[in-house]
Amino acid sequence: MRRPIVIITFLLTAAFLALLFILGETRAEEYYRGMALPECTFSRIDQIENRTVNLCYSPIDGVLSTPEGNLPITGKETVVSDSIDPSIIIEKLNTSKIWKSEVSSPSIPQERYHNIAEPTLASNGTLVFYAGNHFAAKSVVGQWWGYIDPYFDFKGVQVTNLTNSNFSRQVTDIFKADQHVEYDPARRLYLWIRQSEQVISGGGLANIDRLGISRDLDHWLVYDLISTNVLNQAGIIRAVFDYPETVLTDRYLYLTTTVYANDEAKYGLIFRFPLDELSNALEQSRPPNINYEFILDRDVEAVTPVDGASNPMYFGSHLPDNSNIMKIYSWSDDSLTINSTEVTITPWNAIKNGAVCSSNPDAWWCKATTSSRIRSAWMLDNSISFVWNAVVSYDKGISWHPYVDSATIHLNESMRYERKYHLADPNTSWVFGAASSNSQGGLGVGALYVDNRIRDSLTNPYVNFAFGIFNNTEDKWDMMPILNSSARLPVTNERGNNDYTVGDFLTTKAHIGNDLYSWDAGGYIIVGSNYYNVKPFYIMIKN
């Protein structure tokens, strides 16, 4: 029964695109529809007892394991030597304003921790779901953490015909990294995105974004988005997803990702899934197919969703051929089209600016695998804001250090741009800002930082974590150091090489539940010389 539905969906989409062509309207953004099929169900008991969950294993023809990477900004390599206004007020640690828990358990294999930690979290105020790059865990606030193995169900099965009657069946881990988790309080729904390794499927290069849904973090229903299956209707026959990001609205789960298409091009992709359908699927004895829509933009390399936006939903991107121009999107509920406009922002330097790094080859951030793609976006009042990594000089190009740049777009003022929420000061390097507004209109941000006044901080830094609240009177961030690393970069990675990479993102969310706290944040520190010598933390912060 599935094939006719898929054919009808394809024909309707083709008819819509043909109508746009007849009317003379050409758009960079392409609209498509699709349907995700239920893959399987599994439970933590299955994991604990190491049961085989064959239905969860995806048929593949091979696996292409790839190292951790990062999406570069491919804009102009000119150097902006202008300084930027300092925006930081450093406060002393106030332990009465925070509660923190190290995400640690004897059941979490040590090698699953990583210097590219990528903490993501979802909480209903009591039950917390926390994931890093290569592990996941659950906890009731104040109690022990229990391991949720992201590799357990996420496997590929390769079948080889040896003779007419004999087959070889090989099961392989295909989970790679890049997890994102969300919680929908209206439907009591946890959502979990994981990304697979690159695989050979149907003779072509592909990978999988696996979407899991649960109410209790113990029982899961999963759906797979196989890149080539999703994008073949757009004429893309070899495609790989990377850098997923997620945001919830009242009606939808939005998932954005970069697409590496046909071995060369990088495109931006936006999915949306109806939350009602995802929630109702958990109530069915035979889980149904799930409808989704997606927008493909071949003019950008990545798209970031705006936390806190709803109808319309907003997104933003830097243009790859000119990073001083941002493309802002709005997508209304039930609309088959997405609107976009371009906004010019103040020139800035990418964190891996070639000219800067050629004159500072030993700088830790130049040796790291990192980029200036947008890491966080949020809505506050009637404005949307975006932040990303950049570098600045306070002495006309003699020395440089990282900061977090920002762009605020005022929606009710003809898309007026303002640089307002950057994290910068001459004594401190800031990277990977992640901000969120709370229900009282306050704005909080978590970020990694390096104290540039400490000896050898340019080449072998201590990377620490701070959280701040925006001070509207001073127009600055009141930043409070919370976590301090006891070991410097670099660490030794899995291949035995020096690794200066941290990040690749952090998470800050408005706190759900207890009014005593305003934000939840995920941060971590480096505590040893190996890649797995890290301590991740779940943190709750008062306003």
Image (spheres, rainbow, N blue to C red):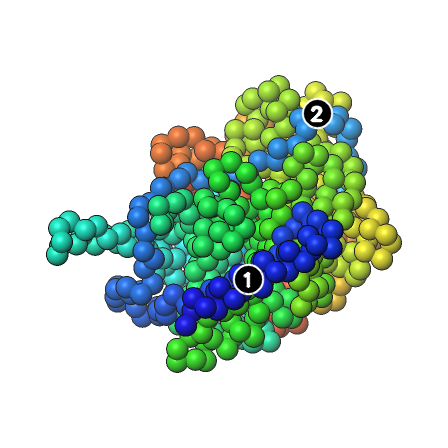
- Of the pair 356 and 18, the residue shown nearer to us: 18
Residue 42 placement (x, y as % from top left) = 35, 69
The crowding category of the residue bearing disc 2, from other C-alpha atoms within 10 Å (few below 14, some 14 to 19, many at least 20), is some
Viewer-nearest of discs 1 and 2 = 1
Q: Nearer the viewer, residue 277 or 126?
A: 277
Look at 72% across and 22% down and name the residue there.
Answer: 397
- Can I make out residue 521 in this image? no
Q: Choose between 468 and 333: the one closer to the eye.
A: 333
Mark 2 or mark 1, which is nearer the start of the sequence?
1
- The answer to whether 316 appears left or right of 283 in the picture is right
Rendered position, 395 above or below 487: above
**Residue annotated with mark 2:** 78
Indicate the amino acid at tag 1.
Answer: Leu
Above or below: residue 363 compared with residue 512: above
Residue type at mark 2 is Thr
Q: Residue at x 69, y 49 (%)?
A: 27
Q: Secondary structure at mark 1?
A: helix
SS type, badge 2 = loop
Residue pointed to by mark 1? 11
Name the side, left or right, on which 176 lies relative to 474. Answer: left
Q: Quadrant of the N terminus?
A: bottom left
Residue at 59% in and 60% down: 13
Give the left or right position of residue 62, taking residue 389 as reference: left
Q: CA distance from mark 1 to mark 2?
A: 46 Å
Residue 55, disc: none
* Residue 158 position within the rendered picture, expressed as x and y whole percent measured from the top left: 26, 52
Q: Nearer the viewer, residue 63 or 214?
A: 63
Residue 283 as seen in the image, left or right of residue 427: left
Task: Please identify the quadrant where the C terminus is shown.
Answer: bottom right
